[in-house]
Image: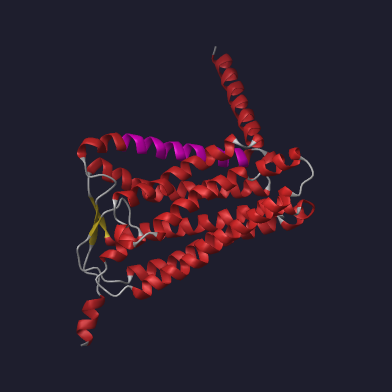
Amino acid sequence: MERSLELGNMTRVQEFVLLGLSTRPGIRNALFAVFLTLYLLTLLENTLIIYLICSHSELHKPMYFFLGNLSCLEMCYVSVTMPSLLLGLWTGPCHVPFTACIIQLFLFIAFISTKCTLLASMAYDRYVAICHPLHYPLLMRPQVCLGLALSSWLGGLLVSVVKTSCIASLSYCGPNVLNHFFCDVSPLLNLSCTHVALTELVDFISAIIIFCGSLLVALASYVAIGNTVLHMPSAATRRKALSTCASHLLVVGMFYAVVLFIYSHPRHINSTGLSKVLSVIYTMVTPMCSPIIYCLRNREVHVALQKTLHLCWVSSVRTDLAHS
């Protein structure tokens, strides 16, 4: 009896086969070029945001501190899923060792959990700035900002340790084919040949704490912001207040809308093409769009970017003159 239990707890599958975003050879090359371009563009955009925030003292503010953390997170986040997506488009269905799959799952859960709590921290920052402007320097002093950022990163890691440990401890007896382009929670649970009720309960509780908790914080912050803006005396003041949080509200809306949809529909359609398309949106499109959204609507970032481009131009001219 003990022997059979030990065998039942063993992981028999040594690798998984990721079918990738598409199995049609005719369009894989075109998709590879598109997604490689988007991936490199995302890395470039977020690197530029981090550079601007670090190199310009006028951007050394709580809002930009969180934006820098978000850009760093987006670079890590997109680099977890995009390599396997690109590899699948280049070579077709790829074989991923069990350990590598679990590591990818761990990093993915850690970064997506961190993003949830970081977006909530950014919403709280905007709440304090608009609803309690006189207390903003005290409530959002550097120690508080650092504490919120560290809590976001460490909280994401803690949630990932718990969830990944539960999923990795399950037995996978076959089949081992994942109709996805990376190792995600639902496809792995669907392949387990053991009872997954406890793992699903852990997944549900962690989702309530991290995802729903951070969403409620963001919603409460923006409800309070909206109430404060409605009671402002002039239209110009209202426009200025709204402009400071419009970018973040758009990013939050995009991210939570897609994630809510993809994880709220029934499990039996989690491996369809629609699920993979939605996964592309929140793993690739939102990290690429976030820097663009923040830059388009932010005058201070515009000014910092213009200064950087001007310095680069002046340096280039001086170099050319020196060489001539």
Task: Tell me: residue 236, above or below residue 63.
Answer: above
Q: 134 or 322, which lies in front?
A: 134
Q: Relative to 278, is 154 on the left or the right?
A: right
Which quarter shows the C terminus?
A: top right
In which quarter of the view is residue 293 placed?
A: top right
Bounds of the magenta span?
Answer: 32-53
Which quarter shows the N terminus?
A: bottom left
Q: Residue at x 22, y 61 (%)?
A: 176
Q: Relative to 33, is 290 on the left or the right?
A: right
Image colouring = secondary structure
Residue 309 place in picture, x, y as percent: 59, 27
Residue 182 place in picture, x, y as percent: 33, 53
In which quarter of the view is residue 178 placed?
A: bottom left
Residue 199 place in picture, x, y as percent: 37, 72
Asked whether residue 155 appears in the rendered view, the answer is no
Q: Residue at x 41, y 37 (%)?
A: 38
Q: 218 or 298, which lies in front?
A: 218
Task: Tell me: residue 75, above or below residue 224.
Answer: above
